[in-house]
Amino acid sequence: MTEHALQDPPTQVRPTLRVGVLGAGTVGTQVIRLLLEQADDFAARSGARLEITGVAVRDLAAPRDPAVPRELLTDDATAVATGNDLVIELIGGIEPARSLILAALSAGASVITGNKALIAAHGPELYAAAAAAGSDFYYEAAVAGAIPVVYALRESMAGDRVTSVLGIVNGTTNYILDEMSTKGLSFEAALATAQELGYAEADPTADVDGLDAAAKAAILASLAFHTRVGIDDVQVEGIRDVTAEDIREARASGCEIKLLAIAQRREDDHASGISVRVHPALVPVEHPLASVHGAFNAVLIEAEAAGPLMFYGQGAGGAPTASAVLSDVVAAASHRVDGGQAPRESFYADLPVLGPEAAVTRYQIQLRVDDQPGSLAAVAGVVADNGVSIDSVRQSAYVGANDAIVTIVTHPAAVFHLEGAVAGLRALERVDDVVSVRRVEGL
Ligand SMILES: NC(=O)c1ccc[n+]([C@@H]2O[C@H](COP(=O)([O-])OP(=O)(O)OC[C@H]3O[C@@H](n4cnc5c(N)ncnc54)[C@H](O)[C@@H]3O)[C@@H](O)[C@H]2O)c1
Ligand SMILES: N[C@@H](CCO)C(=O)O
Ligand code: NA
């Protein structure tokens, strides 16, 4: 074959697919810009010309990025949802996004969304509507922005048995913790900077309280374990109570504090099922997740045959997220041209989702103790008596008193045993204060 024959004839007639966009905010604007700027590439890659017929917005008069042509704007979102071959939902939230997506699917459109909150609350309903209509339902942008982790779990890992997913999936909180760690800022000061830079919303609750990461954890767990996992199945703790002091102490013991999303398969004498949780944890500095800085995301997947896989990149922002949306647009468009369909929901394994009592993790316990002979032995005795095994102990002087700070890292322990040990420590006369109890991951 000559080189010439490999090239795409410019005159080739292609079908046209009608594309509707719901929402022209941070992500929608970039999706529209790229679809228009790179129209020929999208036509060549998908096999169809992608024509944006309408962009539904809430306020027609609002100032807009010039990348969004004014003549495409409409405030009739239902018409955009029901009058196109491909519908891209980038409004966010539950309603009206849910109703618009259902309307689009029942009108026969394929739907692409980045809406993790909606999928974590109503995923099965959306999948069922897509299957009933014979349409595609795609959502790469919903988890970790540009990082192709939905594709990885839904398609690349379809031939393997995933055992765990461990990730930093919220850019805002990673930025805040990183600023606290590298610049010594307080939580409040770091949050204010994140808001100034546009990472955090004016109302940062979903990010800071771990709910955005929990929605993503639910999606990751559903895909990894072929089991329906909703946001209510995820144990969530955010980063509001992480102090600059916690981070300094973590660094002194060779760790960073990261907000982690964790989905693990458990099959042992004590529990069988999956554990899905989001919480701050100490991560040893040599662990790959410890060096994920700023608003970046990273996801580690472990599977039986593949072993460990690591994904890293931009988990938020208009253009990075648009990249993920557009990969789905190309896939959905090429199915319209050449046949084929997106993977359907896979929940055959139906594994039980375990409660918080089943979690077995390592902990770091920090105590302020009397710096007297026998204090360490008393502390170690209480921990052992409660069935918790100690991995390491570090003692440092406490400034301004006859006290010492003792930092204990345990071997993996059940919550029940850990709570017993902490209660026992609090009751010890030699222990003035249990300063902090944090989970440790990645040891
Ligand atoms: N921004 C990111 O970094 C990012 C990353 C991954 C996924 N996402 C997801 O992408 C989606 C969009 O996020 P975003 O950051 O672009 O949000 P955004 O708030 O910037 O944009 C949403 C837009 O939708 C508009 N809107 C609200 N109700 C509407 C309605 N009824 N009809 C038409 N338009 C309406 C809003 O006015 C706004 O312009 C969300 O689901 C979000 O979770 C965002
Ligand atoms: N608010 C989210 C956007 C991406 O979902 C974050 O900070 O990661
Ligand atoms: Na992604």
Image: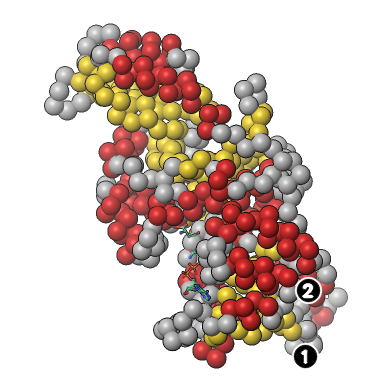
Q: Which of marks 2 and 1 is nearer the N terminus?
A: 1
Residue 439, image x, y percentages: 44, 33
* Left or right placement of residue 341 versus residue 88 in this view: right
In the displayed structure, 75 sits above or below 148; it is below
Residue 339, image x, y percentages: 83, 70
Residue type at mark 2: give it: Arg
What residue is rendered at 51% in x and 76% in y? 24
Instruction: Judge: label 2 CB < 8 Å from ligand 3.
Output: no
**Residue lying furthest left in this view?**
400
Q: Which residue in the structure is indicated by mark 1?
A: 11
Residue type at mark 1: give it: Thr
Decide if residue 40 is in sight here: no
What residue is rendered at 74% in x and 50% in y? 346
Q: Which residue in the structure is indicated by mark 2?
A: 336
The kind of secondary structure element at disc 1 is loop
* The one of 369 and 23 positioned closer to us in this rendering: 23
**Residue lying furthest right in this view?**
1
In the displayed structure, 86 sits above or below 117; it is below
Q: Dot 2: within a 10 Å radius of its alpha carbon, few (fewer than 14), some, or many (20 or more) residues? A: many
Q: Are marks 2 and 1 in contact (CB under 8 Å)?
A: no
* The one of 368 and 311 positioned closer to us in this rendering: 368
